[in-house]
Image (cartoon, rainbow, N blue to C red):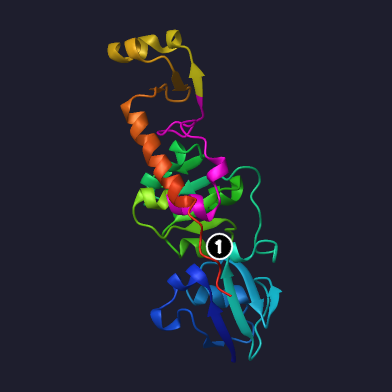
Amino acid sequence: MTTAIFRFHDELNDFLPPERRRREFGVPCARSATTKHMIEALGVPHTEVGLILVNGESVGFDRQLRDGDRVAVHPHRAATGVNPRLCRSLPGEPRFVADAHLGGLARLLRMAGFDTLYRNDYRDVELAELAVREGRILLTRDRELLKLRTLEHGCYVHALEPRQQLAEIVARLELVPCVKPFTRCLECNAPLRAVDKSEVADRLPPSVRARQARFTTCDHCGRVFWPGSHWQRMQKLLDTAIAQATVASPEPEP
């Protein structure tokens, strides 16, 4: 056995027991143990890690630990431009798949215009396969799910309430420039398209047909949407979440 000294930074401390937070602590390691193995054994999913420094040197997940190594583990926001091996960028605009416990968040992400898959009967292996195959970010509150070896992109969602979850994800992934409200169907995730009133008139309540002029429709499920009072409430919700997300994040710990 060897002993390495670990120190976790910023929000990664939330995964640790209180006595190990924001301080150095020694951990016995098998001689073949890698940084990834030990970081996850200590409770932190690899998807949450953006930068690993061993004795001050940036390393990857495959670095084998030696006796006396000092390991500093940082989240993604501390790692921009430092260690691209741990900060693999997603192609194009981010897309998501949410686990069964995040249906409210999935709906809000769709409301904000993000391609978000959700079913309440996805098995863990299906979620991981979808994320890998389609280049999606897996959203979950199950840290063990994020430790699956094949998974590259995932986010542990800390907040409990869907509106706070939306603000958290938008802030963490810097998504404010990507927000395109009301461009996706809230029910089936398909893109919406603008239509003339005449095309959907037979599907509208008389009061809506008389008062509204702008409509979108989902070609997948046939739903029709318009900017009524419900739309205004949703817009206010999005505005609040985006405002929370744009509040400056604290500087990473040194």
In the displayed structure, would residue 59 be above or below residue 242?
A: below
**Residue 92: image location, x then y, percent:** 65, 43
Prevalent SS, magenta region: loop
Quick one: quadrant of the C terminus? bottom right
In the displayed structure, would residue 25 be above or below residue 98?
A: below
* Residue nearest the viewer, comparing 190 with 212: 212
Q: Is residue 174 magenta?
A: yes
Q: Helix or strand or loop: what does disc 1 sit on?
A: helix
Q: Residue at x 65, y 64 (%)?
A: 86
Q: Is residue 120 visible?
A: no
Looking at the rendering, which quadrant does residue 251 occupy? Answer: bottom right
Q: Which residue is mark 1?
A: 47
Quick one: quadrant of the N terminus? bottom right
Q: Amino acid at mark 1?
A: Thr
Q: Is residue 254 left or right of residue 144?
A: right
Q: Residue at x 46, y 21 (%)?
A: 216
Q: Residue at x 45, y 82 (%)?
A: 20
Residues drawn in magenta = 167-192
Q: Residue at x 40, y 35 (%)?
A: 235
In the displayed structure, would residue 146 be above or below residue 177?
A: below
**Residue 220: image location, x then y, percent:** 47, 25
